[in-house]
Every structure is written in structure tokens, then in C-alpha cells.
Amino acid sequence: MDVSIIIVNYRSWKPLHNCLESLFSIDKTKINFEVIIVDNFSNDGEFDFFQNKFKDFIFIKNGINSGFASGCNLGAKEAKGNYFLFLNPDTIISPETLNTLYTTYQDHSDIGILSCLQVDRKNRFFNQKNIFPSLVQIFGTSRFFHRKIIKKRIEIIFNAKEELFYPDWVTGAVIFISKDWFKRVNGWNEDYWLYFEDVEICRKINQKNGKIAVTRNTIVLHEHGGSSRHDFETEHISKTEVIISKHVYINNNFNSLTKIAAHSLLIIFIIIEKIFLSLLSLFLFSSLKLRTNRYILKNLCSYYFNCLKEQTWLSKRAVNYQKINA
């Protein structure tokens, strides 16, 4: 088996259907591949229908919603391919994409993770000029001004004329990696339930002198947010987990002095922001986006209380948190 395509799904059945249909268009005479779908306990009655419709693909029913990293690892355990393509359910790939990723990866022995260009339905390209988070990069406002300061350096790094460019990290929506590299970094870090696990796996590969690359020779359609935002509850949980995962990343990757500063500043700015937006939502009740902030604030207060109680930055939903507290 050349490649195992691994997709983690949670109630993203409509975009998943389009994604799986696109995989049928791949020419199996050029490359031998399997498709593994890990369903993270959608528990909505759709699993059996999809399993029966797409009989050529492997479906795994997870007993809990253990998060993206855990779902990817579960799929990798069952995979027979020498290479893995981790793919979001809200992506659609063209017939030549898999072969382009496969041949490009084999032609460049220094690459640890390979991705490609991503575009949405309005033909807008995703920004993939990603730099590892630092104290100034972890906050939206400071990140904006920092990128303005280093704009020329970024333009040099991401030379538009080259076939490949090399960001610090790539999004988990499209990640092509060899089984060997995957084992060398011990797979996806299950400290994370959702978000920032892609940044960390790229960092681990970078630390072992592997390159993170993006090829311009193929494009994937990505309906951003289609796999994580289904309703009001999912929306505020997902946005809370973004903040939690920032804390986990800081704890795992920052040095002691920077770690204290980053955690403290993140807590202060986030709480002030969410209190302000929550109060504003009382006057603009019709704004669903503003009301979401009240639930995020409530979630964060519960999270920070648990951090003090359990002495950990991990989300209660993360597999490694559950292992510690088993």
C-alpha cells in the first residue's frame, strides 16, 4: 500500500460526502491507496448510511469524541500505507493531487511534512506563510504588527517563483507525511483536543531537521470551518478550545520565563476581551456572534479554575488529561 488517506469526522457528513466522492476520481493505476474515516462519536445515525454507501473505504467508529489528534492517531494505527495523507472532511481534492504530493515527497528527501495550496469556494487562497508562535506571535494584535515589521523577511522566505516554499508549519487540513517520520515524532500529540496539534507536529519535525514544505503544483478546495462549526454549541466550544490549545502549546514549547509571561498575558487579554464583548451582547442581543462570547467566558472561567485545581493546562476533553485523571 502506497498511501493511507486518513480523515477524522465529527458530524461533517455533507462536506465529507463531497470529499469522499472526490477521492473516487483518483486513478488507482498510478498510486495504490486506502481511505480510512474515523468518526469521533457523531452519534447522529449517519455512520451506518455512509459505511454502506462507501463500501470501498474503511470506517472506524470512535466510542467518544476524543479530538482531532487522537482521531488521527487511531486512523494511523489501522493504516497500511507507507505514507499518510491526513485530510479534513471539508476538503475536495482533484484527481492528480494525491500523485503530486506522493511524487514531490519522494523527490525531496529533506521534507518531513508536505502540504499544498488551499483555496475556498470564492477562489480565495489561504494564507500559508505561517511562523511558529512566539510571545509576540501568540496574540492577534501583536502578531499583526510583528508581521508588518518582518514583512520583507517573510517575502524572501516565501518566494513566489519557486515550486516549493517552506513555512514553519502547515494546517492539519492537508498533511502528507511518511510513516517513518510519523513514528519518529510519536504521531500527533494528544495533549490537544482541537487546534495547535498541527503546529506542534511540525515543530517536532523541524527540531529533527525535517523540512515543512508546501507545493504550488496542486490545489485543494477547503471549506474552512466546515468540519468544526455546525451549531451554536459546537461554535463556542471550538472557540474556547482555540484558547485552551494556545495555553497547552505555550506550556509545551516556551521556555520558563517566556512561558509565565505568555500565560499571564493571554489570560488577562482574553478575559478582558470576553467580558467587554459579553456586556456588549446584552445591548445587541440579536447578534449571535456576540452572544457566543458569554459562553466562551463561562467555559474559560471553568477551565482556569480547573487549571488551578488540577495543576495542568490540558483541556478536560484531551485524551492525555483523561489518562492522567483515570
Image: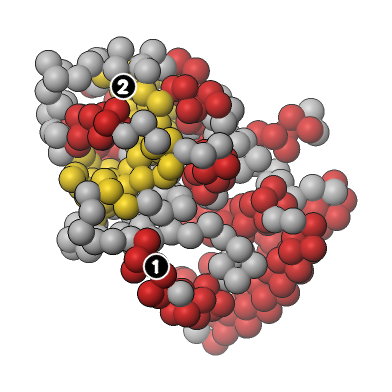
CA neighbours of label 1 inside 10 A, class few (<14), some (14 to 19), many (20+): some
CA neighbours of label 2 inside 10 A, class few (<14), some (14 to 19), many (20+): many
Residue 302: % across, % down: 75, 57
Quadrant containing the C terminus is: top right
Residue situated in front as seen by the camera: 273 or 188: 188
At x 75%, y 60%, the residue is 259
At x 30%, y 12%, the residue is 1
At x 24%, y 61%, the residue is 160
Q: Are marks 2 and 1 in contact (CB under 8 Å)?
A: no
Residue situated in front as seen by the camera: 160 or 77: 160
Residue situated in front as seen by the camera: 118 or 149: 149
The type of residue carrying mark 1 is Ile
Q: Quadrant of residue 154?
A: bottom left
Which sits earlier in the primary sequence, circle 2 or circle 1? 2
Residue 294: % across, % down: 61, 70
Residue 72: % across, % down: 48, 30
Q: Secondary structure at mark 2?
A: strand
Residue 10 in view, yes or no: no
Q: Using the image, tell me which numbered label, if any, was put on residue 3.
A: 2
Residue 105 in view, yes or no: yes
Residue at the bottom extreme of this rendering: 283
Residue situated in front as seen by the camera: 217 or 270: 217
Residue 95: % across, % down: 13, 33
The type of residue carrying mark 2 is Val
Which mark lies nearer to you, 2 or 1?
A: 1
At x 56%, y 37%, the residue is 208
Q: Using the image, tell me which numbered label, if any, was put on residue 154.
A: 1
